Amino acid sequence: MQVNLVASAVAWVPKPRENKYVQDLSLFRFLLRITEPPNSIRQYAVGANGGNCRDDKLKNLPHIVEGTLLDCAEDMLGYRREELKYGAFFDKSTPRFFMSLEDNDDERCTTFEHLLLERSMLRKQLLKALQRAL
């Protein structure tokens, strides 16, 4: 039996009352459910940070797969902008995104730093959601 993954993924609809993190978890579970064969997918798991609660029989997800899933979730939540990437350097006087944050430079910098902090916290929570989904 052939499964059209693109059509199946497009058909996924989150439940309206779930928060964003639960929706991400639901999407990851949905992707796992539609991916064949299930046995080869189950042999991978994202290792827990710091080695806590890690089952040594499980293999890590390849970094590119883990990164793609996390980037997709960040993109869905609106945090996947070049300016918000860790260590990104840009001229604060030109990007439309930075200029659209607030009315003056001090408020823009404060809001921008808040968005950076939110993104880093979100990335950790997305990684935990991905670990739970697997």
Image: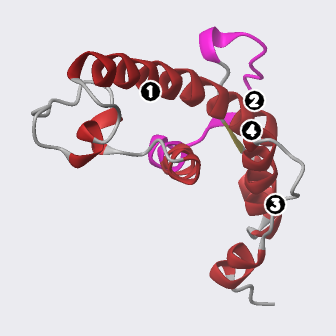
Find the distance from the CA under tag 2 to the CA under tag 3: 32 Å
The mark nearer the N terminus, 3 or 4, is 3
Instruction: List x then y, in percent, for residue 120.
Output: 49, 23
Q: Which label number is shown at residue 115?
A: 1
Residue 102 visible in the current orientation? yes
The span picked out in magenta is 49-67
Q: Which label number is shown at residue 57?
A: 2
Number of residue marks: 4
Looking at the picture, tell me which residue is in the foreground, 102 or 31. Answer: 102
Q: Amino acid at mark 1?
A: Leu
Q: Amino acid at mark 3?
A: Pro
- The answer to whether mark 3 and mark 4 are in CB contact below 8 A is no
Find the distance from the CA under tag 2 to the CA under tag 1: 38 Å
Q: Amino acid at mark 4?
A: Tyr
Q: Quadrant of residue 133?
A: top right
Mark in the foreground, 2 or 4: 4
Q: Amino acid at mark 2?
A: Lys
In the image, is 128 to the left or to the right of 90? Answer: right
Q: Is residue 9 above or below residue 78?
A: below
Looking at the picture, tell me which residue is in the foreground, 14 or 8. Answer: 14
Instruction: List x then y, in percent, for residue 91.
Output: 9, 33
Find the distance from the CA under tag 1 to the CA under tag 3: 25 Å
Q: Residue at x 13, y 34 (%)?
A: 90
Mark in the foreground, 1 or 3: 1
Residue most toward the bottom?
1
Q: Which residue is mark 4?
A: 21
